[in-house]
Each structure stands twice: as structure tokens, then as C-alpha cells.
Image (cartoon, rainbow, N blue to C red):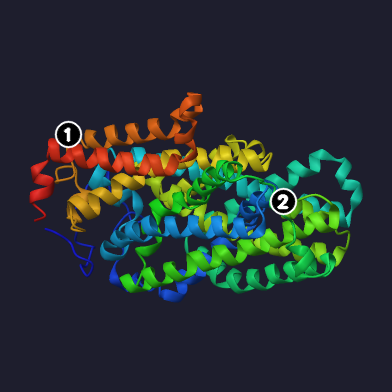
Amino acid sequence: MSLGPDTIYHDVPHDPRLYNEDLAPTPPSRRTWSTYNYIALWFSMSMEVTTYMLASSLIAGGMNWKQAIGTILLGNLIVLLPMILNAHAGSKYGIPFPVFVRASFGTRGANIPALLRALVACGWFGIQSWLGGQAIFAMLNVLWPQTSAQPGVQWICFLGFWLLNMFVVWRGVESIRFLQSFSAPFMLIMSLTLLFWMLHKAGGFGPMLSTPSQFHSTSSFLKFFFPSLTAMVGYWATLSLNIPDFTRYAKNQDAQIVGQAFGLPLAMTLYSFIGIACTSASVTIFGEPIWSPITLLGRFHQPFVAFLALIALLVATLNVNIGANVVSPSNDFSNLAPRYISFRTGGLITGFLGLAMMPWKLMSSFGSYIFGWLVGYSGLLGPVAGIMIADYFLLRRTQLDTDSLYRRDGIYEYAGGINSRAIIALVAGVVVALIGLVVPALRFLYDYAWFAGFFLAGAVYLMLMKAIPVSVAIESLD
């Protein structure tokens, strides 16, 4: 029995090892997200501290504001393509990412890309929790300067904000939609307030955006530009995989396509401009580029401004942390053992792993953030995206047997539940993307990590699937 998007799901036969209520296809009655919901999703997830720091790091690295905006816009237009392509299956079949990826990796093999995505999300969860704690600590320093001499207070702020995230996770996935609808317009207002505050301090847009490029030759600019572009793509490489976790709730394909095509590049470019402008203004005001908004706000010792900034940063950080860094890994961990791991349990696992990944080291400088964290993990996720898109669009022509995605004896069982062709393609893509870390002569491959892994893994997967076809998995869908 092949299931389409309008099937009633409560009578679907399924294997309890592959199924629970969180992983089940979304029924039509719950597919209520409109174009506005996806625009709001992107605005609420883009308007947060790491996006600001993503943009400001380009200024701190030597770009002028035009070069930085162009790099960010191009990177987001590139990542928009795999985002919309992978979103298609979520809208059509109502399935989340860890179920969708069973089609290419197998019912058991899907745990490998799901765990790769989940571990990256855990890192992001830790980073966002650290930044939220840093924001609280910085604001306390403004309101009560004596706290700056007490480093233990910083760790209390971090753990306190982490516990707040855990509380929201425990309340369940519906709290995410409430946060998004509330925070999107609020964050836009607060971000513009910060921009105009810096505009006033800098003496206008002229001085604010007058910081020149620090690159004096094309070759020196390109050496910084290409890994930065990879980092821009890598920033949303996570969500380009698990976007079905959100588009499974779409009213139709047009809602998610239009909402994402409008929301992602516009929101990222707008909020990036705020980060770029404020960082450029910091050069005019303080004589140095301050890439962290938390540090920047700490320079203004005015309690009222500190209080408003604290509220804005906490709302933004909490919203994106739950929306972008809990939904996916919770589903991914649940996919490991659906009978024992619920969404809530998966969220708690995410939180504790986020602590273990020591986010304070990942955010120690703009170099470690851009060239270490973002570019590095893009080399892990780019190959997964290449395999998923090659399988769904080029091999299966968007046709899936939904029933078999939840059964161990279906067409996606391959050999013991693992498609070895996908695993080989994944390993090949990751090795090529990351080999530049250990072989200096091949460093350029690491600078293009997402692109190298994406195209190589996709090509290897297609070649292997055609050379050693799994006829039952392909022909049954013709």
C-alpha cells in the first residue's frame, strides 16, 4: 500500500522500531502552515545573535560592507536551492527528515546522516545557550559592575539560560510556533532600534559604513572570500537537511516554496546588514571592529538600553535555539529507538550533548567560528544533501512509498536496512571535503568543503546506484 499526502494514517501498518507518533506522517488536519508561517519562521530564526556575528565577522576579517552583504546574499541564494528541494518531500508526504532519509540510506542506515545532523545541532544548541548566558552576564555587568570580577556568575548565567531552554523543550513542540509568531515582529523592532542607536553614536550612515576593505589585492580578497562563502552556505546547511521537519506541516507546496524563497534571503540580508553596519560603526566609535553584539552593548553603560537589549537577545536566542536546534535532533534521536525516545527525551539528550561540546571554545574568536565551526561541519552535511537530492529527484522522480519507510521488509530495507552505496558516497564526500585539514596542498578543498562534498557524494551515489542497481527500490516506483 503506497500512501499519498491525503491518506488517513491511523490504520497504517508499521514497525515499532521505525515508528512513533512524532515520526508518523503528518495528517491533513495538522497541515496548517501558510506562506506567512514560513516567512515568520525565517525572520525569527535569522534575527538572532549568531546571524549578527556571522555578518560582523566578515567586517572583522577585513571586508567592507558591500563585500560582506554580497557574500552573505550569494551564500543564502545558493543554500536556498537544496533547502527548497529537500523541503519538497516534507510537504508532499508529511514526513520528517529522519524518515525521508531512509529512502536513500536505508531504514537502519538513515541513523548515520540523522546522527551527523543531530550532533551539529547539539553544537549549535550549546553555542546559543552560551551566547544567551553571555548576554545575561554582560547586562549584569552594566547594571551591577561588581559582577564582572566574579567569573562564577558567568557560569551561573550560562547554566540558568540552558535550564530555561530545557523548560521550553519540556513544554513541547507547540511552544515553538508561539515563540516564532511573537518574536519575529518584536525582533525586527529591537534590531532596528539598535541600528539607529549606533547610527546616532557614529554620526550618520556615512561614517558608519565608511570602513574600507582591508584587502589590497584580488588574490588576498578571494583567499578570504571563498571559505567565507562556504561558511555562509554552511550556516544553514543544517536546516537544508531537516527542513522537512517544518514543511511537513505546510498547507501545500506553494506555501513552503514562496515562504522560503522570500523569507530566507530577505531576512538574512536585512539582519546581516544590521550586524555589518553596527560593526562598521564600532570602528568609528571605539576604534576597533567589535564583532559580538554582546560585547558591543556592554560598551554602553546605560541601564535602560541594557535592559531592552537583554530582552531582545534572550527572546531571539531562545527562539532560534528551540526552533532550529531542538526539533531536528529530537526527531533524529527518536529515530534511533522510537519505542523509548520521545521528542521530549530527544530534546533533553540534545541539551546535555550541547554542554559536552564546550561551546565557549567554538565561539572564542571569529576565526574559530567561521573557518573552524561553520566550514568544518559543512563538510559533513554537504555530502548528505547531495545524496538526498540525487536520490529523491534524479532516481525516484519524487515518488516514495511512504508505507515502506516505516517497515523493515519494504523496498528501503536494502541489505539489513543499510544502503551501502549511500554510505560509500557519504564517506567519499566527507573525506574529500575535509582532507585539506591534514594535507596542506589540498587546503583549497576544505575552503570549498560543502560544495566539494555535495557534488562528489551526489555523483558517486548516482554512479553506484546505476552500476549496482537495487531494482526493487527503483522499478516499483515507476
Q: Is residue 6 visible?
A: yes
When asked about the image quadrant of residue 435, the answer is top left
Q: Give the left or right position of residue 20, taking residue 354 as reference.
A: left
In front here: 44 or 388? 388
Above or below residue 37? Residue 295 is above
- Residue 295, position in %: x, y? 78, 51
Q: Are marks 1 and 2 in contact (CB under 8 Å)?
A: no
Above or below residue 304? Residue 143 is above
Q: Is residue 418 visible?
A: no
Question: Looking at the figure, which quarter contains the C terminus?
Answer: bottom left
Question: Tag 1, which secondary structure?
Answer: loop
- Residue 89, position in %: x, y? 28, 59
Real-space Cα separation, disc 1 to disc 2, in angstroms: 49 Å
Among numbered discs 1 and 2, the one appearing first in the sequence: 2
User: Residue at 54% of width from left, 72% of height from top?
Assistant: 181
User: Residue at 48% of width from left, 71% of height from top?
Assistant: 39
Q: How many marks?
A: 2
Which amino acid does the dot numbered 1 rest on?
Answer: Ala
- Residue 462, position in %: x, y? 21, 42
Question: Tag 2, which secondary structure?
Answer: loop
User: Residue at 55% of width from left, 55% of height from top?
Assistant: 71
Q: Which residue is disc 2 drawn over? A: 292
Residue 415 disc label: 1
Above or below residue 90? Residue 349 is above
Which amino acid does the dot numbered 2 rest on?
Answer: Ser
